[in-house]
Image: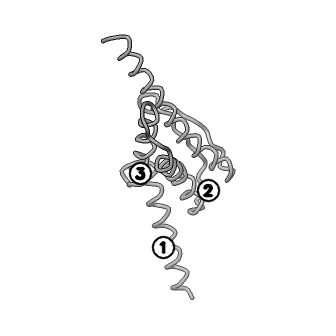
Amino acid sequence: MTAETLLLLISYVLLIGLVVTIHESIHWCFALLFRRQPRVTFDRFLTPTVRYHNTHVDWQNLIISGSAPLLLFSFGIWVEGDGGAWVVVKILCLVNVFNFFPVTTDGQMIFLSLVKMIQKQKWIKQRS
């Protein structure tokens, strides 16, 4: 492995770390905005994860969990991927679309929040 290849590999790993950190920072900011007492923990492979106090306010949970994938995916669409590191950043941001699927933690929270909001609306209509 040449020095150039090693440097390229290190830069890609750092870019992945940067995008993951930005992703979790967005969750943290929205959890802080809703006064959910966010804290950062490190899960598998030293991946940062934001945990917060759940007050069972479904629309807030939806915003907290959906904000990071939405903002990063939007940035991925907007940013020019002309070459080099910007292509990697664009791809990493666009990959955030998978966080909307219920197989991820964000996707599970989005799905559960939407289901609970729909159930509450049906319950309110039945009582009327």
Q: How many residues crowd mark 2 within 10 Å: few (<14), some (14–19), many (20+)?
A: few
Q: Could you tell whether 99 is left or right of 54 in the image? A: left
Secondary structure of the residue carrying numbered label 2: loop
Secondary structure of the residue carrying numbered label 1: helix
- Per the image, the residue denoted by label 3 is 97
Q: Residue furthest bottom?
A: 128
Residue 83 placement: quadrant:
top left
Quarter of the image with the N terminus is top left
Q: Nearer the viewer, mark 2 or mark 3?
A: 3
Quarter of the image with the C terminus is bottom right
Instruction: Pick whichever of labels 2 and 1 is earlier in the sequence.
Output: 2
- Per the image, the residue denoted by label 1 is 119
- From the top left corner, tell me how far across and down residue 110 is, in percent: 47, 58
Q: How many residues crowd mark 3 within 10 Å: few (<14), some (14–19), many (20+)?
A: some
Disc number for residue 86: none
Q: Disc 3 residue type?
A: Val
- From the top left corner, tell me how far across and down residue 64 is, in percent: 57, 53
**How far apart in space, not on screen, are marks 3 and 1 (Cα)?**
26 Å
Q: Considering depth in this image, is 53 or 24 the residue closer to the camera?
A: 24
Q: Disc 1 residue type?
A: Gln
Instruction: Pick whichever of labels 2 and 3 is earlier in the sequence.
Output: 2
Q: Considering depth in this image, is 68 or 77 the residue closer to the camera?
A: 77
Tell me which residue sits at (49%, 49%) in the image. 69
**How far apart in space, not on screen, are marks 2 and 3 (Cα)?**
26 Å
Tell me which residue sits at (46%, 36%) in the image. 86
Q: How many residues crowd mark 1 within 10 Å: few (<14), some (14–19), many (20+)?
A: few
- Per the image, the residue denoted by label 2 is 55
- From the top left corner, tell me how far across and down residue 36 is, in percent: 65, 49
Instruction: Pick whichever of labels 3 and 1 is earlier in the sequence.
Output: 3
The reply to whether dot 3 and dot 1 touch (C-beta < 8 Å) is: no
Q: In the rendered view, would you say 118 is above or below 45?
A: below
